[in-house]
Image (cartoon, grey):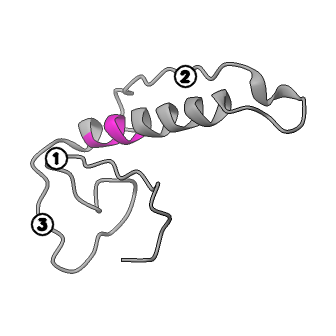
């Protein structure tokens, strides 16, 4: 694993795998997922939105639009595209 700062936060998606994270062919020996692609992607999206909201809440060194609240909607499309 790469050397990352001690404050690095990891989000575990139980039952997920690399192949389902996006449109990706996976890795050799990637275990089969035990959650659906939609469930895995929604969990990943929610973690990303949470991180962005935390970053947005940090004190800004320069005034600007970065202080606006982060909002998002995560609908699952019927055609299988998140």
The label shown at residue 72 is 2
Q: Quick check: marks 1 and 3 in contact, CB under 8 Å?
A: no
Q: Which residue is mark 1?
A: 14
Tag 1: Cα neighbours inside 10 Å, few (<14), some, or many (≥20)?
A: few
Tag 3: Cα neighbours inside 10 Å, few (<14), some, or many (≥20)?
A: few
Q: Secondary structure at mark 3?
A: loop
Residue 81 makes an appearance in the image: yes
Residue 43 drawn above or below residue 10: above
Q: Which residues are magenta?
A: 40-44
Q: Quadrant of residue 25?
A: bottom left
What's the CA distance linking mark 1 and mark 3?
Answer: 12 Å
Asked if residue 63 lies in the magenta stretch, the reply is: no
In the foreground, 69 or 33: 69
Q: In this rendering, would 52 be left or right of 33?
A: right
Q: In this rendering, would 34 be left or right of 8?
A: left
Residue 28 drawn above or below residue 50: below
Tag 2: Cα neighbours inside 10 Å, few (<14), some, or many (≥20)?
A: few
Q: Which residue is mark 3?
A: 31
What's the CA distance linking mark 2 and mark 3?
Answer: 31 Å
Whole-percent x, y for residue 57 in the image: 65, 27
In the foreground, 81 or 4: 4
Q: Earlier in the sequence, mark 2 or mark 1?
A: 1
Q: Quadrant of residue 31?
A: bottom left
Magenta: predominant secondary structure element? helix
Q: Secondary structure at mark 2?
A: loop
Q: Secondary structure at mark 1?
A: loop
Q: Residue at x 25, y 49 (%)?
A: 12
Q: In this rendering, would 54 be left or right of 26?
A: right
Please identify, in this view, whether the residue under mark 2 or under mark 1 is nearer the observer: 1
Whole-percent x, y for residue 55 in the image: 62, 37
Residue 82 makes an appearance in the image: no
């Amino acid at each position: 694993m790469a050397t990352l700062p001690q404050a690095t936060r990891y989000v575990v998606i139980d039952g997920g795998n690399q192949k389902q994270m996006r449109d990706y062919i996976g890795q050799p020996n990637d275990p089969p997922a035990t959650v659906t692609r939609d469930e895995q992607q929604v969990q990943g999206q929610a973690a990303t939105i949470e991180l962005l909201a935390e970053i947005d809440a940090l004190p800004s060194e320069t005034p600007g639009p970065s202080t606006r609240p982060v909002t998002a909607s995560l609908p699952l499309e019927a055609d299988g595209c998140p």
